[in-house]
Structures are given as C-alpha cells and as structure tokens.
Image (cartoon, helix red, strand yellow):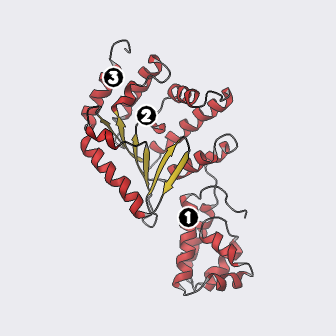
C-alpha cells in the first residue's frame, strides 16, 4: 500500500497506535518486527505513524509475533485495518480542493464532538449554499465557477455529520459582529441568519453569541476548532487557520489551552435562547427584513 501523504484519518491513527501498543506490550523493537516481515525498520516506523498501510498477510505475521492468539481480538484488529484503508466521501474532491482542507474534512467526519469558535464567518457546517458561494468569491476572487461549485458541494456533504445516525455534537461560539458582516449582500445574510435560528433549535447544536460589548472579545485571536473522537484512546485535536495556513495541535497541554479559553467564552457568551434573540435582532435590523 502506498505511503499516505495526507494527514492520517482517525481510523488510520487508531490502527497504527494499536500495532505500536501491541509491539511494546510484547517487549519487541522495530528491528524485531522488521526481521519478521523481512523489511526495513523504516517501514515499521511509517506503519506506526499511520503513514503507510499494511497487507493482510503481513498483519497476520505481526499478530503472531506479538502473541495475539485470541481469535476475536485478531478479527477485530483485521477489521480495523480494513476500515483504516476505506476512502471517505471527500476523496471524490481530492483533485479539486486543497489537501489541507481535505485532511480537515476527514477529521471532522470521524469526530463525535466539535467545539468551534468563529470570529469572522459563519461556521462551515452551518453555512447556506449562497453564503458559502459568497464567502469563497470574497476569499478567492480568482476562483473559477467550477471551483466555487465544488466548495459549495463539499460544504453540503460536510453537513451530513449533523444528521447521521449518531449525529455530531456541535458547540459553536460566534462573535456577534459576524451576524452583521454582509457576506453576499443582505438577501444572502437574511437567508443565512434565518437558517442559523432554525439550526440553533436542533438538539445536537448549541449556538452561543458572544456580545460585541463582552471584554472576552479581546481573547479572540482568530477562529479555532477542538475535535473529540468516540474512541477514548484518541486524543483531542485543536485546529487553527490563517492566511498563512492551518495548524493542528494534539499535545495535551496545547489542546488544554484551547479548551480553557472555550470554557471562558462559554461562560461569557449568551445562552442559546438569548443568542437566538440576538440573531433575530440582526435579522430584523433596518433594511434586512
């Protein structure tokens, strides 16, 4: 299987971590596993860093070497290997969207909970198609009609995580000023704000507005996302972006810093009902409705 050049999915990282833990539990080194597979140690390093896949025959050799004899456990690990290699829906757009964006969507698809702070735009998961189109045109004025259409299609498919059998739990803190940014003009914003009000009524979405007067606005250095995953062995990930690119943080102290700020913002922002009132106020301001 070829080396994975993009950021590994959660499934790939979970499988890689499982193999690493099994090797360590068996008291073996990379050299021991490499000898059993008749390969270079670098192959084992890539495998345990989720940077390459593994053939079933090689996996079974490693399970024998690591002393995994329980048939049920072997079946489970083999199933993890198959799941890790499955392609998600977003791979259909890999040639049309930025690889960093595709990597983010892959993580988002695997997440069970997302905490999102937005300072300039409506979160992607809550954008209407018209708003997305307008935002893309503003951010990338050179984008072709086809590229814009692709971005709108990807946003639409991303929203399925909110409607799946076990829906994503989505917490959003939105700076109030975002409600007044006329992205796409007033008609587009009218539709977008009406959509936000309806979305805020969903049981798996908690939308809070941080008032413009709140001193906590001084702590908003930019948008960020915290992702949590269903498997307890997977650590949380924090994500930030700017015009210079995207950054991921998965070390516990770094993620905890983002979590602490989210807690402060959560306490300072209006509750869901009052936030809905603020959205309605922005919607009914002079000339919008």
Q: Nearer the viewer, residue 90 or 225?
A: 225
Which residue is pictured at 45% across the width and 35% down the height?
A: 126
Can residue 167 be seen here? no
SS at mark 3? helix
Q: Residues within 10 Å of mark 3 (few under 14, many from 20)?
A: many
Q: Position of residue 62 (x, y in %)?
A: 64, 80
Please state if 8 lies on the left or on the right of 254 as rendered: right
Marks 2/3: CA–CA distance? 15 Å
Marks 2/1: CA–CA distance? 32 Å
Image mark count:
3
Q: Earlier in the sequence, mark 2 or mark 3?
A: 2
Q: Residues within 10 Å of mark 1 (few under 14, many from 20)?
A: some
Q: Position of residue 120 (x, y in %)?
A: 43, 34
Nearer the camera: disc 2 or disc 1: 2
SS at mark 1? helix
Which residue is pictured at 53% across the width and 82% down the height?
A: 24
* Circle 3 residue: 282
Nearer the camera: disc 3 or disc 1: 3
Residue 22, placed above or below residue 93: below
| Residue 120: image tag | 2
Which residue is situated farthest in the top direction here?
287
Q: Nearer the viewer, residue 287 or 128?
A: 287
* Circle 1 residue: 13
């Amino acid at each position: 299987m070829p080396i994975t050049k993009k950021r590994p999915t959660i499934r790939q990282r979970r499988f890689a971590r499982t193999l690493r833990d099994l090797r360590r539990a068996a008291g073996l080194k990379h050299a021991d596993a490499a000898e059993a597979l008749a390969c270079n140690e670098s192959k084992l390093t890539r495998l345990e860093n989720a940077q390459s896949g593994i053939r079933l025959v090689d996996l079974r050799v490693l399970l024998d070497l690591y002393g995994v004899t329980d048939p049920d456990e072997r079946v489970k690990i083999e199933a993890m290997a198959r799941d890790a290699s499955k392609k998600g829906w977003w791979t259909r757009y890999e040639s049309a969207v930025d690889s960093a964006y595709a990597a983010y969507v892959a993580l988002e698809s695997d997440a069970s909970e997302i905490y999102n702070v937005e300072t300039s735009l409506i979160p992607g998961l809550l954008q209407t198609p018209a708003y997305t189109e307008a935002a893309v045109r503003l951010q990338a004025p050179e984008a072709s009609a086809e590229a814009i259409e692709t971005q709108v299609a990807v946003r639409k498919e991303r929203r399925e995580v909110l409607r799946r059998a076990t829906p994503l739990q989505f917490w959003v803190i939105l700076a109030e000023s975002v409600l007044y940014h006329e992205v796409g003009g007033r008609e587009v914003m009218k539709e977008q704000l009406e959509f936000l009000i309806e979305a805020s009524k969903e049981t798996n979405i908690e939308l809070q507005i941080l008032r413009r007067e709140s001193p906590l606005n001084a702590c908003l250095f930019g948008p960020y996302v915290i992702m949590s995953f269903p498997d307890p062995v997977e650590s949380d990930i924090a994500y930030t972006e700017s015009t210079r690119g995207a950054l991921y943080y998965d070390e516990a102290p770094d993620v905890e810093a983002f979590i602490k700020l989210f807690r402060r913002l959560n306490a300072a922002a209006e509750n869901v009902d009052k936030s809905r009132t603020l959205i309605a106020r922005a919607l009914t301001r002079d000339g919008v409705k």
